Image (spheres, grey):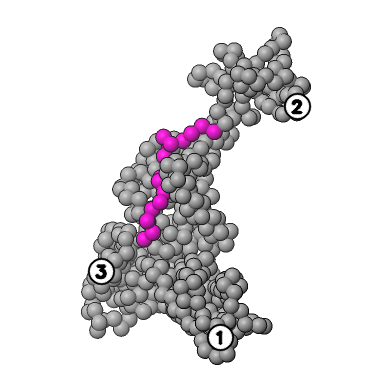
């Protein structure tokens, strides 16, 4: 799904197909743009004032990485219903291993139909599907597909299919791409037509990989994610505890510890259990199935507190344990923004701020909160440098 | 999907930040001696820290301003400017 983040915004705001641009995490430059905006001349990397100058009707959206992450996690979960082998490559791009699915679904067309049916459950649309041997061929096939359609590359025809494709589809750094263009190479076929050893002599090990990809002889398999074993954090009290506040505090600490477990990274908690061993024997057990799997401590803690209030343990607790028993795929490790912990934290702050703004708007009927954006920071006239825009309305 | 709670940003929703606010300034010749921050609040200028001039947009509608940074009686620091085209005074953070 190209422009996955932008599609997410278009879907939830019902923005239609007008000129829309998504800002980068800093909110200063344009990151993703709709095809209409591109036709008008808006390009990724422009500042807000440049983009608005080119297209006054451009609708600018602040990024919401947590939302995109959640949407992508749902997409992966939907794909997981078709095949157990799903590899998330980046936001909006995933590979599905189909080895062995023939008996269940049939040939490539039927497999793609099953995937499309699974994706229909996930809002967004605009998916492009590609079927081929290995990740590179299938990805190139997907890039050639029309939105909502699929391209199948039959076994044995990989080289012929790839030969017509542009060189830019290879995973190239700008310097290598420039060098290849200087050599007069513009298509994968042109690269594959060179002797492999000659490319290796020029570009080393990278050249070998590029040549093999271009020739369709390198088949990289889809690597599914390994679901982690349950993660447990326990706490033994020196003396039995019955005080609610102390137990709430203990839950917070245990959740923190369990979330920090390296095995949990990249996964969201779907099933949460809290167990307690009570004074003079007996036990207390709470099981919570999260409709929206999460990796946020506060979200996990909330239902635990509710259960603690609704059905508290019969006696004081000697030993308390929190267990993450089932998981849903998360994309935290892959998310463009969330790779940067600071950016992820910033996204969370924005989310909290948006929540506060909603509250204010409900009470006062006006958001009363504004965001400062740079308009002409270089201007000698102070009122031209920055502007206010409704933070949320 | 999580329901949208936000509206998109549009150029027509931009509000000017740090817009000039009209004020009345008492002058001694061309030097400000007092600023009327409101109809009943006259503050005497204790010291003038800096004076500078901005000329801009001569290719469109010329903008010419004489900025004054001053300390008022009581210690408050303010910046105000004279619109040299109209002679009106405005308060603004530089």
Q: On what subunit does the disc labeled 2 rest? A: B
Magenta segment boundaries in residue numbering:
B1-17
Q: Quadrant of residue A204?
A: bottom right
Question: What's the mark number on residue A117?
Answer: 3
User: Quarter-wise, where is residue A339 in the image?
Assistant: bottom right
At which x and y percent is residue B63? 56, 19
Tag 1–tag 2 contact (CB < 8 Å): no
Mark 2 packing: few (<14 Cα in 10 Å), some, or many (20+)? few
Q: Residue at x 36, y 48 (%)?
A: A34
Residue to which mark 2 is pinned? B74
Does the CB distance between marks 2 and 3 fall below 8 Å?
no
Mark carried by residue A278: 1
B67 w.r.t. A42: above or below: above
Seen at 36% across and 79% down, the residue is: A84
* Callout in the foreground (2, 3): 2
Q: Nearer the viewer, residue B51 or A214?
A: B51
Q: Work out whether residue A325 or residue A24 is closer to the camera in this orientation and state it.
A: A325
Q: Is residue A305 above or below residue A57?
A: below
Label 3 and label 1: CA atoms lie apart by 49 Å
* Vertical side of A70 occupied by A47: above or below: above
Closest to the camera, between mark 3 and mark 1, is 1
Where disc 2 sits, the SS reads loop
Q: Secondary structure at mark 1?
A: strand
Q: Position of residue B35 (x, y in %)?
A: 67, 19
Element at label 3 = helix
Q: Is residue A387 left or right of residue A130?
A: right
| Labelled pair 3, 1 in contact (Cβ < 8 Å) | no
Quarter containing the C terminus of chain A: top left
Chain letter for mark 3:
A
Residue located at (67% from left, 19% from top): B42
């Amino acid at each position: 799904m190209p422009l996955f983040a932008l599609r997410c915004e278009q879907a939830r705001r019902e923005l239609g197909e007008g000129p829309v641009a998504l800002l980068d995490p800093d909110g200063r430059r344009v990151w993703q743009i709709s095809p209409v905006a591109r036709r008008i001349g808006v390009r990724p990397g422009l500042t807000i004032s440049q983009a608005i100058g080119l297209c006054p009707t451009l609708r600018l959206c602040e990024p919401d990485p947590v939302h995109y992450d959640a949407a992508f996690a749902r997409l992966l979960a939907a794909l997981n219903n078709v095949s157990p082998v799903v590899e998330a490559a980046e936001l909006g791009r995933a590979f599905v291993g189909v080895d062995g699915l023939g008996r269940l679904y049939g040939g490539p067309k039927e497999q793609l139909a099953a995937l499309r049916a699974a994706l229909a459950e996930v809002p967004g649309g605009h998916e492009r599907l590609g079927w081929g041997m290995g990740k590179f061929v299938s990805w190139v096939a997907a890039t050639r597909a029309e939105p909502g359609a699929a391209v199948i590359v039959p076994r044995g025809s990989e080289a012929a299919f790839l030969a017509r494709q542009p060189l830019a589809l290879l995973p190239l750094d700008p310097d290598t791409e420039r060098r290849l263009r200087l050599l007069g190479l513009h298509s994968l076929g042109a690269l594959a037509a060179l002797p492999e050893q000659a490319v290796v002599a020029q570009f080393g090990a990278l050249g070998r990989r590029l040549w093999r990809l271009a020739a369709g002889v390198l088949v990289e398999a889809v690597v599914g994610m390994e679901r982690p074993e349950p993660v447990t954090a326990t706490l033994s009290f020196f003396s039995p505890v019955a005080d609610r506040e102390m137990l709430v505090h203990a839950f917070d600490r245990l959740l923190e510890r369990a979330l920090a477990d390296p095995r949990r990274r990249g996964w969201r908690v779907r099933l949460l259990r809290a167990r307690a061993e009570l004074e003079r024997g007996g036990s207390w057990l709470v099981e919570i199935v999260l409709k929206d799997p999460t990796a946020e401590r506060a979200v996990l803690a909330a239902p635990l507190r509710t259960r603690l209030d609704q059905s508290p343990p019969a006696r004081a607790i000697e030993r308390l344990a929190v267990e993450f028993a089932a998981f849903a795929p998360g994309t935290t490790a892959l998310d463009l923004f969330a790779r940067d912990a600071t950016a992820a934290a910033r996204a969370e702050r924005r989310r909290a701020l948006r929540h506060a703004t909603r509250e204010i708007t409900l009470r006062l009927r006006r958001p009363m909160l504004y965001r400062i954006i740079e308009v002409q920071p270089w201007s000698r006239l102070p009122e031209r440098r920055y502007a206010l825009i409704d933070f949320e309305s | 999907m999580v329901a949208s709670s936000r509206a998109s940003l549009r150029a027509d929703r931009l509000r000017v930040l740090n817009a000039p606010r009209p004020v009345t300034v008492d002058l001694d010749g061309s030097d400000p001696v007092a600023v009327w921050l409101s109809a009943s609040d006259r503050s005497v200028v204790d010291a003038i820290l800096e004076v500078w001039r901005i000329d801009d947009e001569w290719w469109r509608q010329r903008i010419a301003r004489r900025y004054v940074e001053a300390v008022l009686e009581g210690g408050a620091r303010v910046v105000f400017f004279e619109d040299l085209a109209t002679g009106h005074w405005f308060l603004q953070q530089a």
